[in-house]
Amino acid sequence: MLTVTGTPVVPGLAHGPVLLVRTEISAAAVAAFEAAPALDPEDALAAYDQAASLVAEGFEKRAAEGSGAAAEVLTASAGLARDKGLRGAVRKQLRAGTSLLPAVHAAIEQFASVFEQMGGLMAERVTDLRDIERRVTARLVGESEPGVPVPDVPSVLVAEDLAPADTAGLDPRLVVALVTEKGGPTSHTAIIARQLGLPCIVGAQGAQDLAAGVRVLVDGASGVVEVEPDADHAAKRVADDKAVRAEVESWTGPGHTADGEPVKLLANVADGESSARSAEAPVQGVGLFRTELSFLNRTEEPSVEEQAQIYADVLRPFAGRGHVVVRTLDAGSDKPIAFATHEGEENPALGVRGLRLAFDNPGLLERQLDGIARAAEETGVETWVMAPMVATVAEAAGFAERVRERGLKAGVMVEVPSAALLAHRMLEVVDFLSIGTNDLTQYAMAADRMATDLAHLTDPWQPAVLQLIAITAHAGAEAGKPVGVCGEAAADPLLACALVGMGVTSLSMAAAAVKPVGAQIGHVTRAQCEEAAEAALAATDPGEARDAVRRIVLA
Ligand code: PEP
Ligand code: MG
């Protein structure tokens, strides 16, 4: 049977006809527009303004219909379509004598290359920019905006990559799975698919060669798309999956293995709203509060008092529910924060980011710790504090001292391979460790976590990454101190079992992933988890590791 394989990002099975996303605008419409008499620069700019404004309105309308992350990405796209800098770049092109469509293209490319150079999350926004160009161009030439067609029957959406605007408006009753040729496990496609609970495979080369309408069976756990499978076989697998999903839905926690070994399942949160939502999930606290996400749009550092209120909003929903791990500012690289990030770095991912910002600006960290301590006192919630991007034991010791001075528990993230290799020494100076597998993978494999064409390397199932996790977890068990995982790896039900087997004591993830992970761990014994860990560590590549673990935990 013909199959297409990619990186699995959201588990689940779906069977349906292929629906190809149209990203092209008809060449005839473009040719007709270009053959018409050229507009003078001012008229051309007015036409651009009108088209960009219609595109922005379209995004805003869909944002108003949606909610959560979906609405946020649409609002961000609307902002980009109305961006004054982008308009200025178009105007400059027009005044230099470039005609309208090439002027829009050049302006978009200019922005895309700046975003690409910034790397990380900004590079991810290049997809949004190109989507805006297609939509504006379509408006200018008198076509409807390209994007996801509305299917007549529940379908499998297949695309090169999906822009936030495409994924944000998806109706999960009509789109049953997502398969993209590009995009990594942290792409917008993956994030939205996870939010909607849609089986999803990214980096599936050859997917776009599938003919529209051909029936496929998508397995979001293995990353395999079966083309024209036997209908009975497909129906049975989908029905079995439905039963599993129903069981997952009814999982209520707390997390433990089948033989009763407790595994703390925690939530990753960004602000008060996501904290309140996460508190409704069967979690025992928060394992990662990404404080920098509250400051993405701030030009000035908020006062200690204002910070305390922001943090208290996050802590409060967990009063009486468990502890909250607050991460100090992880600004820089993929998360530029105007008042903290160092400008003009050659290589921001390896630059002054995370805890390193405190090297020449210790007050920034001190004030944040004051804000956190005040919020902890005000809410009475057990608050742990950890630093991102720690590379040396001395950094960990200095950080822990400042945190403990304020009566809080101190830990560090293990995101740099040096921290994993010296985990036992880190644990002599801190109370806990939390493994950030997103960055640990990026730095262990020397592969940008957002690089869509390096998805096979930015995979936490890589044996080298698993080794670093195992070293860290082992050090925790020896020291008798908690070692958690708070990167995306914790949200993968199969990998979660292997992580528990390695000795990881807590798993922190987006609230939507908690039930699938909790239900899966509840099916296996501690011994099976250990066997899974051993098999994963012995595998030669991610595919072999996944297969080996699947055989053990789904036996
Ligand atoms: C990580 O690196 O795994 C992590 C949890 O931090 P972030 O994704 O915010 O960089
Ligand atoms: Mg990180």
Image (tube, grey):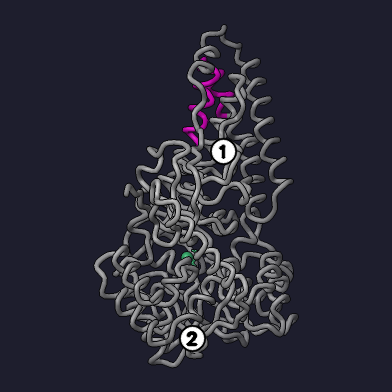
Residue corresponding to mark 1:
148
From the viewer's side, name the closer residue of 83 and 280.
Answer: 280
Region rendered in magenta: 89-111
Q: Tell whether position 135 is magenta.
A: no
From the viewer's side, name the closer residue of 407 and 342.
Answer: 407
| Camera-nearest label, 1 or 2 | 2
Percent coordinates x, y for residue 17 in the rendering: 49, 43
**Res 134 quadrant in image:** top right
Q: Residue at x 74, y 70 (%)?
A: 309
Residue corresponding to mark 2:
258
Looking at the image, residue 366 sits to the left or right of residue 500; the answer is: right
For marks 1 and 2, the one nearer the N-term is 1
Whether 444 is drawn above or below 62: the answer is below
Q: Residue at x 65, y 32 (%)?
A: 55
Percent coordinates x, y for residue 500 in the rendering: 43, 81
* Disc 2 residue: CB within 8 Å of ligand 1: no
- For the C terminus, the image quarter is bottom left
Is residue 290 among the parts visible in the rendering? no
Q: Amino acid at mark 1?
A: Val
Q: Residue at x 42, y 70 (%)?
A: 415
From the viewer's side, name the closer residue of 520 and 27.
Answer: 520
Residue farthest toward the front in the current orientation of the protein:
232
